[in-house]
Image (spheres, grey):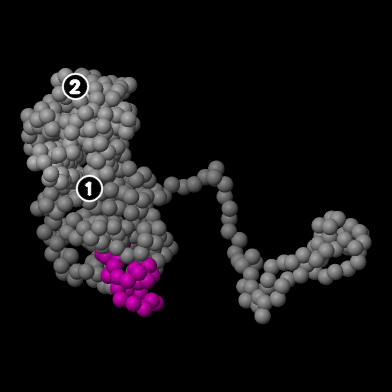
């Protein structure tokens, strides 16, 4: 049974005694010891006091010299860009994406290039046999790469095999949902199994200095399957985005302890595997139809890289009484509703009796708030059937008051547009010219943009 801990505190000097006495032994005052209630002491707490018996850890200041972690270049520039410069030794990276998006293909290409460069690479597949991985490598033209292939789902077997030789510089586990730890009961893919298997593999990577890459499944909503703690355990989380019907793929870092999360890597799926796209703007603007109403080019910022994409809008008038539809692909539907509300309330345009469809060409997804002005220009163009000039770009954020606000990196957006042959830009008031030869049209409010597009 727990018993309260008694102590007696001197009211004159503050000294503490375990028993009462008439005179304080420190200051000599009489009748100054008063009992105070301490914490409850249990037999378990008495034997398991964590304040002693441990190992003292070194505490360093923020100004201490720190050696930067070694980077392992994969030989794929777009992958290295998304990682912040390459894989870091003794780090854990989680990459997720829809089935068939190209996760295994990308990692096999990276593993093969590292192996051909002289690094020791191990690729363990829990979903395919080693012969299947070998056949895919031959289709990609990487059959001669000295990658050590294995097919296993037992974490104990994998770690036992790796301990028999020198630790690999890169270890790929495809996928973590197929791994099984015999220390935990349950089928592979359960929350406890995924957590336990990932913990053992990450511990091995930290102790041996191996760059670990885990492939993760996703749910039907696009989120990584399994426990959320898995994303907290790893150092980097990469999301492989794109539609299987399109040839492009986007690799985006959503978490990176060794770099930024604002860079992307762009790939195109070809017969020989995933190919790097050095100029994504040319990809997203390919086969762009000129002279069509409802199309506007927007320079989106992905980290330090401007990417020009086309925003397409379609407005269809309905008969009275019909419920209009709002469909958005590649942008936030709530933000589209806000832009439509501002156009109706501040500019006098009517979309209440029309269906509105908005699409970002190529399946690209925009999260940049600077796209508001380009979306508004596309909607006005589609409503009035007046095409925006083909050599024009637009960017700016729209407030609920109808004000057009400035955005960051305006100079980089203009320079990238000038390189691709664009000559005019619809920008917020106060924006500075960032590229010679670009003619800027400044707008302080959305109403001025509507008047400009309608030729009022």
Secondary structure, mark 1, is: strand
- In the rendered image, residue 421, in percent from the top left (x then y), is placed at 15, 26
For label 2, the residue is 452
- In the rendered image, residue 94, in percent from the top left (x then y), is placed at 32, 58
Span shown in magenta: 169-197
Q: Is residue 317 visible?
A: yes
**Quadrant of image for the C terminus:** top left
Q: Quarter of the image holding residue 244?
A: bottom left
Front in this rendered view, residue 159 or 249: 249
Which residue lies at the image location 32% right of the left edge and 30% below the top edge? 401
Residues packed near mark 1 inside 10 Å, few (<14), some (14 to 19) or many (20 plus): many
Q: Of label 2 and label 1, which has the lower sequence position?
A: 1
The answer to whether residue 172 is magenta is yes
Which residue lies at the image location 24% right of the left edge and 41% below the top edge? 337
- Alpha carbon distance from label 2 to label 1: 35 Å
Give the answer, above or below, for where 33 lies relative to 75: below
Q: Quarter of the image holding residue 32?
A: bottom right
Q: Is residue 378 left or right of residue 238?
A: left
Q: What is the number of the mark on residue 250?
A: 1
Residues packed near mark 2 inside 10 Å, few (<14), some (14 to 19) or many (20 plus): some
- In the rendered image, residue 123, in percent from the top left (x then y), is placed at 26, 64
């Amino acid at each position: 049974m727990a018993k309260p801990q008694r102590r007696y505190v001197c009211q004159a000097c503050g000294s503490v005694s375990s028993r009462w006495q008439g005179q304080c032994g420190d200051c000599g005052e009489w009748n100054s010891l008063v009992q105070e209630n301490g914490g409850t002491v249990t037999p378990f707490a008495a034997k398991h006091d964590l304040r002693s018996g441990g190992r003292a850890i070194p505490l360093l200041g923020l100004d201490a010299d720190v050696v930067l972690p070694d980077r392992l270049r994969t030989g794929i520039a777009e992958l290295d860009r998304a990682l912040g410069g390459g894989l870091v030794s003794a780090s854990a990276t989680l990459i997720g994406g829809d089935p068939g998006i190209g996760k295994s293909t990308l990692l096999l290409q990276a593993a093969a290039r590292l192996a051909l460069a002289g690094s020791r690479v191990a690729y363990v597949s829990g979903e395919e046999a080693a012969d299947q991985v070998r056949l895919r490598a031959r289709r990609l033209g990487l059959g001669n790469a000295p990658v050590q292939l294995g097919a296993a789902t037992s974490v104990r077997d994998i770690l036992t095999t790796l301990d028999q030789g020198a630790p690999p510089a890169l270890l790929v586990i495809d996928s973590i949902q197929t791994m099984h730890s015999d220390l935990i009961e349950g089928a592979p893919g359960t929350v406890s199994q995924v957590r336990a298997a990932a913990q053992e593999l990450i511990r091995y990577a930290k102790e041996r200095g191996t760059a670990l890459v885990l492939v993760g499944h996703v749910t039907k909503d696009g989120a990584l399957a399994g426990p959320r703690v898995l994303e907290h355990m790893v150092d980097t989380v990469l999301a492989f985005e794109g539609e299987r019907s399109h040839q492009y793929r986007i690799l985006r870092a959503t978490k990176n302890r060794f770099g930024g999360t604002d860079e992307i890597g762009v790939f195109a799926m070809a017969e020989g595997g995933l190919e790097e796209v050095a100029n994504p703007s040319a990809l997203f603007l390919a086969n762009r139809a000129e002279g069509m109403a409802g199309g506007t080019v927007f320079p989106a910022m992905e980290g330090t890289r401007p990417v020009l994409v086309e925003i397409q809008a379609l407005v269809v008038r309905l008969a009275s009484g019909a419920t209009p539809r709002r469909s958005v692909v590649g942008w936030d539907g709530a933000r589209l509703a806000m832009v439509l509300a501002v156009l109706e309330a501040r500019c006098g345009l009517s979309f209440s009796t029309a269906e509105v469809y908005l699409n970002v060409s190529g399946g690209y997804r925009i999260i940049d708030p600077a796209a508001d002005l380009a979306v508004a220009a596309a909607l006005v163009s589609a409503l009035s059937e007046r095409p925006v000039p083909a050599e024009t770009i637009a960017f700016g954020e729209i407030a609920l008051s109808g004000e057009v606000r400035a955005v960051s990196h305006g100079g980089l957006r203009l320079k990238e547009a000038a390189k691709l042959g664009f000559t005019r830009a619809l920008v917020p008031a106060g924006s500075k010219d960032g590229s010679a030869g670009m003619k800027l049209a400044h707008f302080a409010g959305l109403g001025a943009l509507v008047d400009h597009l309608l030729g009022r």
